[in-house]
Amino acid sequence: MMSLKFEMSDLGIEVSQEIDCVTIKQAKAGMEECNAEQCPMEPRLKLSKAEDEPEVEATHYRRVVGCLHYLLHTRPDLAYSVGVVGRYMQSPRESHARAVKQILRYLRGTILYDRCNELKLLGYSDSSHNVDADDGWSTTGHIFFLGKSPISWCSQKQDTVALSSCEAEFMAATLVACQAVWLRELLVEVTGFKKQKVLICIDNNSTIALSKNPVFHGRIKHIHTRFHFIRERVENEQVEVEHVARDSQVVDSLTKALARVRFGEMRALLGVCELPLQPFRG
């Protein structure tokens, strides 16, 4: 639809259109012949600055991580693991290099966009709590679907320490609300669709209660005022927050490393599937 109004090209991305879906991949960045891993990062892996470990060649490390960052345009399942290894670009160590190699061995997949008649914007918000061993900051993750297709995703460290999982999720929800408002306006501008309320799914009931309550009270008085943006957006009905069960929290894999079975379930919900064995024709 956007190509009808703008001159566009997909750099480094191969596109295959079928009757019921559109498949996109980045074959040049993949490693089709390597021994595959089932998940990009082990759930019990605790990376840190590890100054007592031997250093690895920093230029090569940065080059590989830079390529992985480029892959994030079509691989939301890599968002958390690539974000973690990207924190050690200044002085990479052997443990960081091993984590990067596991991501490379995992890289055998592509994202599948199902065709859908109902183009409704739906967001998911989640946050881990104090997972960084160096500074205790939490990790925010979000993803937005248009119909059944993921169109925007992010995994990033928060810039302040959260005192509880509720606070971490509340701060994450505010960042997601900002993205929701922007996507809402963008879709209206590009498609001409009528403005609609954006639903954001969160798995923390306390966060939902805080988002819907316009009254300030002692529990949240220490939270920076900018994080109360979501309460204003809920009050003026630009966004709506709703509870989602943890088993259905699609964005869980963008906030922490998951066990193989759980990661596979979340990857399927994101629309990522195995690359076909036959040669790909764009």
Image: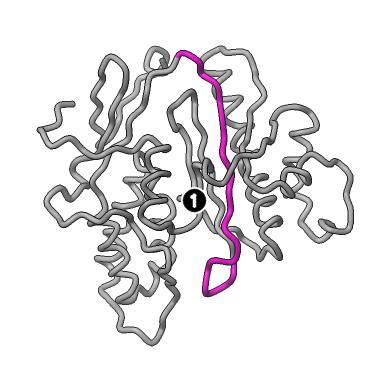
Colour logic: one colour
Which residue is rendered at x = 28% and y = 53% of the image?
A: 38
The span shown in magenta is: 117-136
Q: Is residue 127 magenta?
A: yes
Q: Quadrant of the C terminus?
A: top left
Q: Quadrant of residue 23?
A: top left
Q: Position of residue 49 (x, y in %)?
A: 44, 77
Relative placement, left or right, of 18 versus 196 is left
Q: Nearer the viewer, residue 106 or 84?
A: 106
The residue that appears at 50% across and 45% down in the rendered structure is 251
In this view, 43 is above or below 134? above
Q: Main secondary structure of the magenta part?
A: loop
Q: Tell me what residue is drawn at x 38 percent, y 18 percent.
A: 115
Answer left or right for 9 relative to 249. Answer: left
- Location of mark 1 (residue): 155
Dividing the image into 4 quarters, which one contains the N terminus?
top left
